[in-house]
Amino acid sequence: MLQYVGFAVLPATREYSFSVLAKDSPDRAFTVVIDHSAFRHGLLRYQEAPGLCYGKLLAALEAETGDSPLCSRQRVTEGEASAYTLSGRAKGRKWTEEERLEARKRFNATRVQRIAR
């Protein structure tokens, strides 16, 4: 399961953190970085960034092989940000019932973990 953890604002970038939780292997942490210029130049809106990062990381994990494990730090290029925005994935996108259910599960699991701390 790929779980969005949160983000950090740094001087030149925003870093989006994710965890991969799997039953038969240790948890893995990933960071996806987006330069501030992508937001300033209108390529991407702040609220679109987590979805873009999630999709990029999910695709990379699906393409991962045992011979070449995925680097824990990924970077979104200007081209990827532009393509994401132009595809209209974030604007007016309708979630499927399955996506809503998964999002609720992730949210509730995160909330339970925070309360347990």
Image (tube, rainbow, N blue to C red):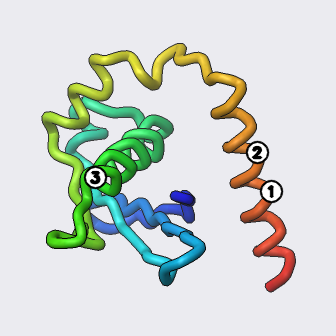
83 on left or right of 25: left
In the image, what residue type sits under mark 2? Arg
Vertical comparison of 66 with 107: above or below: below
- Pointer 3 or 2: first along the chain: 3
Query: Which dot marks residue 60?
Result: 3
Q: Quadrant of residue 39?
A: top left
Could you tell me which secondary element the residue under label 2 belongs to? helix
Specify the quadrant that holds the N terminus: bottom right
Could you tell me which secondary element the residue under label 3 belongs to? helix
Residue sitting nearer the eye, 16 or 13: 16
The residues bearing labels 1 and 3 have C-alpha atoms spaced at a distance of: 26 Å
Q: Where is residue 13 in the image (x, y as percent from the top left)?
A: 28, 60
- The residue beneath circle 1 is 108
Q: Nearer the viewer, mark 1 or mark 3?
A: 3
Q: Where is residue 6 in the image (x, y as percent from the top left)?
A: 54, 62
Query: Which dot marks residue 104?
Result: 2
In the image, what residue type sits under mark 3? Ala
Q: Which residue is at a point 73% across and 64% down the rendered structure image?
A: 110
Residue 27 can be seen, yes or no: yes
